Image (tube, grey):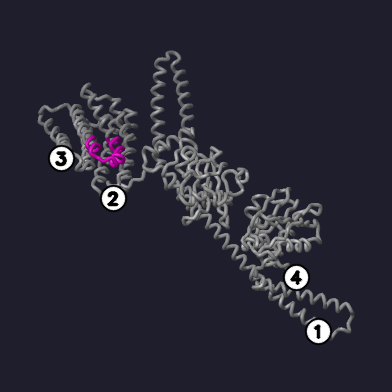
Amino acid sequence: MNAFGIASYGIAALSFLVLTVLLITAWRGRQQGAHLIVASAVTAAWAGILALQSYTGQVPVLVIYLADAIRGGAWLLTLVAVAGIAAPKPLAMAARGLCVLLLAAAVVLPILEHFDIAVINPTLLLSRAGLALSLVALILLEQIYRNSSQVARVSLKYFIIGVGTLFAYDLFLYSQTELLRAVSVDAWTSRGILNAFAMPLIAIAARRNPEWSLEVFVSRQIVFYTTTVLVIGSYLTVMALGGLYVREIGGAWGNVGQIVFFAGAIVVLASLVTSAPLRRHARVFISKHFYKNKYDYRIEWLRFISTLSSTDEEDVGRTAVRAMAQIFTSPGGFLFLREETGKKFLPYAAWPMSIDSLGLPASLSADDDLPQFLARKQWIIDTDEFRRTPDFYGNIAIPQWLLDNQQLRIVSPMLQLDRLVGFVVLYDPPPPFELTYEDRDLLKTLGRHVATHIAQQDADRRLAESRQFEAYNRLTAFMMHDLKNSVAQLKLIVANAPRHKHKPEFVDDAIGTIANAAERMTKLIEQLRGATSADRQMPVDLRELAQQAVSRCSYRAPKPQLQSGPPLTVLANPQRLSVVIEHIIRNAQDATSETGSVSVSLGQNGREVRLIVEDTGAGMEADFIRNRLFRPFDSTKGAKGMGIGAYQVREYIRLLGGDVEVQSSPGQGTRFAVSLPLSQSQDAPAPADDAVAG
């Protein structure tokens, strides 16, 4: 029993059996595919017979010859089918004739032996048949390669290398047999493992040649782990031979030397197997040299979708960055999104770090070169390539903070219907990494998917808000109904008052108070109805509105202080704008202790008017400002607040063509800045004293 021979041919039989199953399940009926399936199945059976011979040692040489002839003939016919018209006709006929001749010899020789007619030695017959098959097969492979086009050679090279390995080794084996007049046992038993090494090459060739109608999928994971097992097995075999050699030459210390040698070999093997850079290099090598595609898209896409839809992170932007970074083994990245006005891009999320810890700029104007280039060209920017050849990117002005950080490598746009909604910046993946066209195409696809995903999340949020507003509007309708009844009752009391003047004086005072309340509630009803007069805009003096708001808020501490400034005219509804200013001041007072301060100032910058309210209160976290401050129905005041004040402030200011900016830090106070376009009118009429219902 030859253990190595059993293992060698057993592995070969298993390898080609797996290949046969793959080919059968993927076959689409073409002739070349059928020949390849038969050749693979015959090779599996041939390896099984030789494994049995290594185990028992009792398989007749004639049976081995027949198995060898059938296996060689099957591959010859496969080569003829693959070559097609590229192979010279005499060569194709010679290949077919050789197959027939070798099979006929297997039938005729036993008959001649039965009649005591001298025949050739079976071992020499085996070697000469093997030599003939090997020579014809190698000539056919040379014809296939030489007569193929440049494009065809790319997809055929693995087939030629794989099958060439089978017959090149046979040529060596049988040439040695002819010289020694005997088969070398070591060379014979090693033949199986060499055949097993050739199997992945043949499988990849079948995958790369769709004209054979074999849609074979060979997983990168299978190739990687199979190759790893084969390499580890080869390594252990070599180390075993090395250990035997150490024991033989070591004398009295031979056994100790062998143990030390094995221990060192195991340590080296463990170091290599657990080395992340080595595994990464191996995966890149397999992808580059054995596959047309760099990525196993089925695996990568499933992982991308799984990460994107996971609930590990509440922030959808952070999850999106993580999903993209994982595909390229990038250590992290961050995301910029276009704000609702479309004027600038804001830092939105980062992974695995916090967005606030990166020291990124507060915003990036939509008119800058980088977002304009991404929107116009829809290109992926490689910052390493940009540093070397900026003219390739049109010499655009990339922000200096992006170029100064050598670790920031990839800038990928996020597009929704060809509209730039944001961009992702990824850190440089571990080497070896080269940004190829395949990476760029994948990044574009991922960017569009992430943009759609974030847009869907935003649409869901807006839908939830609209439903909340609908409920709020229904609540308002009930309030209007109740207020109408109250007003009617109060007016009835006022109407009946002249008939009860003989009652005490306090009744007259009560009637006056009730009349005043009725008037105020009537105004509230008009506002809740959304009367057209409430939305009518006119030139108003922002300074005067600020003075009135400060006066109304002065009854409580800390008392707001209005700094002097020039008259500034804006176009707005005086009632609504006054309510906005008063709301900002009251919020500042709510956040500030009685010993603190609240200041209101006005200024002008070109055609823009700015109203700034600053306080020395508790301040707010950056995450709260970014994600919750302007979100409707999200209040920090508990049951006391509806959570719509800040939202209404920003929406009305944006309706007027302005914007709101908030700067705050915990314990450092808050700065609330309102920007509005300056009105064309020079004379701003003062708003009425009763513009705002107190």
Which of discs 1 and 3 lies nearer the camera? The answer is: 1
The residue sitting at the front extreme is 682
Give whichever of discs 1 and 4 has the lower sequence position. 1
Q: Is residue 10 left or right of residue 123?
A: right
Q: Position of residue 341 (x, y in %)?
A: 58, 57
In this rendering, would 75 be left or right of 435?
left
Image quadrant where one finds the N terminus: top left
Q: Is residue 306 magenta?
A: no
Give the number of the mark in front: 1 or 4: 4
Residue 63 in view of the camera = no
Identify which amino acid the numbered label 2 is placed on: Arg
Q: Magenta segment: does it hold 147?
A: yes
- Residue 372, relative to residue 190: is it above or below? below
Name the residue tied to disc 3.
89
Give the residue at mark 4: 690
Give whichever of 21, 392 is nearer the camera.
Answer: 392
How far apart marks 2 and 1 lie (CA) works out to 98 Å
Q: Nearer the viewer, mark 2 or mark 4?
A: 4
Q: Earlier in the sequence, mark 2 or mark 4?
A: 2
Q: Separation of disc 1 and disc 4 at Cα?
A: 27 Å
Dot 3 crowding, Cα within 10 Å, few <14, some 14–19, many 20+: few
Q: Amino acid at mark 4?
A: Asp
Q: Amino acid at mark 1?
A: Asn
**Segment colored magenta:** 142-163
The residue pinned by badge 1 equals 496
